[in-house]
Amino acid sequence: MEKIKTDLSNLDKAFPDDFSQDQIAKAKTLFLKELSVSVHKFYQGKIQTVPKAGVFGFNWFNVYYTPGVSKVSTDIRDDNDASFDLSNRGNLVAVVSDSTRVLGDGDCTPPGGLGVMEGKAFLMKYLGGVDAVPLCIDSRGKNGKNDPDRIIDFVKMLQHSFGAVNLEDISQPNCFKVLDVLREECEIPVWHDDAQGTASVTLAGLINALKLAGKKLGDARIVLLGAGASNTTIARLIITDGGDPGKIIIFDSKGSLHKGRADIEADNRYYRKWELCKSTNKDQILTIEEAMKGADALIALSTPGPDTVKKEWIASMADKAIVFSCANPVPEIYPYAAKEAGAFIVATGRGDFPNQVNNSIGFPGILKGALLIRARKITDNMAIAAAHSLADYAEKRGIDPENIVPTMDEADVFPIEAADVAVQAIKDGVARVQISWQEAYNKAKADIEYSRNLTKSLTDNGFIRTPEESMLQDALDKAIRQV
């Protein structure tokens, strides 16, 4: 058992030597939760507003504010697109949520999502060089029910101050309508990261996992456990990228999706699920046990907890089986258990296990690419381009069963991804400006380096404090006691 380090690089070795793998997995989750509360209280949040213009004398306020700024206002009035050059709008994202489905914790009330949305903004700045503002809103109508139209109206009203909108943690079925309406009716890209972001990164991981297994996407039999925003979008992107819909079997809480699901057909709020009912599961397999027999891949985004996916299901899968157990904060089965059951490649949504298939390597680069060319929307083709960008990047530097996708500490993956997305946006005809791949890469790389250097400078000069070692040790001790 080692003393916990500030960079947490020795986390697996910081627990008692006699802890089992199951105890270590549980203890890590508890430790990260305990430390998260302490650190958030220590910093009182994770982001702040920092000026990007210099104050060279107080007369400069006459330039930044009145009377000089009047010319900026009238120039934008005469050409609204000038706002992308004359304000921070061109590099600014609104992170919008009604906090009705926060991670695996469900409805956390509007302010309950602030920790996640601030985290989203933090990652956008550090990884993608993008500024972001968390906006947690109350979507409840007079009847007390969450109303998707309230979210739609809110985003439509705020779109003129931002270059893009990142939707987050909105429960289904509201999430489907909110995204689809706003994608078509807003003048800026509206992106649902739980759906499109997770789908893009999952596709990237699946591409490389299938390569290592010696299998092709079009031939693979794929089971998806969970039919929320993430998995329904994952299925759509897999099919668009060449997967065989007939060999895809999706399960929700009531069973498999197929043409006979009259309950889904009758509820038009679930139109995305009904589309998949009509196109997938050609043999109308009804049970998860039957579906898993001979399956090449399982993609689980369902109920958190290590017993949601059974070891016997994995044992019945095809040779070199691929298991993505991506529920947060606790995967549906721990990686070691999936490997014991015979899985060839296992991925989760967590960074403390190998193969983190998590949208954190997707949205910073994707949104940066969309902002660089002032996109009007983010198309499915752009999300798929990002998936192949991530997969190609990982393959070029080397992949193996424990390392199928890039990680957040591979800084160059984000400007490459941004440039690939920007070029695809131009091809799709949704870009306001035309730039080359190299121009997009250079701009993204410069902005990301600026953001990282700014954070380092603030830390080195004491403007960002380092948590005390006792804070880490206290969280570790609490976690161990609970196990």
Image: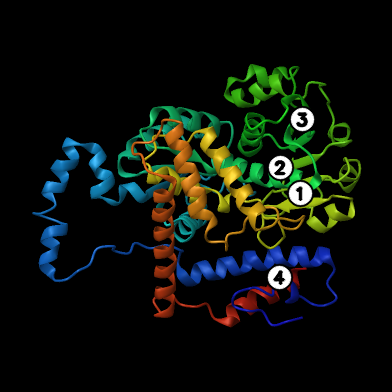
Residue 272 visible to the viewer: yes
Q: What x and y, as percent, mark residue 115?
A: 51, 57
Tell me whether the residue at label 1 lies in contact with that at label 3, contact meaning CB atoms closer than 8 angstroms: no
* Amino acid at dot 2: Ser
For marks 1 and 3 on the same chain, the one whose residue lies earlier in the sequence? 3
In the picture of the structure, the residue carrying the numbered disc 4 is 479
In the image, residue 29 sits, relative to residue 458, either above or below, namely above
Q: Is mark 2 on a helix, strand or loop?
A: loop
Amino acid type assigned to the residue bearing label 4 in the image: Ala
Q: Residues within 10 Å of mark 4 (few under 14, many from 20)?
A: many
Relative side of 205 to 322, left or right:
left
Q: Which amino acid does label 3 sit on?
A: Ile
Amino acid type of the residue tagged 1 in the rendering: Glu
Q: How crowded is mark 1: few (under 14 residues within 10 Å), some or many (20 or more)?
A: many
Instruction: Please state which of the two labelled residues, at mark 2 or mark 4, is closer to the viewer.
Output: 2
* Rendered view: 105 above or below 191: below
Q: Do the residues labelled 1 and 4 touch (CB within 8 Å)?
A: no
Can you give x and y, in whole percent of width and height, for residue 189 in the image? 42, 37
Q: What residue is shown at x 23% (from left), y 42% (from top)?
A: 82
Q: Name the residue under label 1.
A: 332
Q: Mark 3 points at which residue?
A: 249
Q: Mark 2 points at which residue?
A: 302
Q: Give the mark nearest the N terminus, 3 or 2.
A: 3
Q: How far apart are marks 1 and 3 (CA)?
A: 18 Å
- Lower sequence index among marks 1 and 4: 1
Distance, label 1 to label 2, CA atoms, is 7 Å
Residue at (63% x, 79% y) in the render? 5
Q: Identify the mark nearer the N-term, 3 or 4.
A: 3
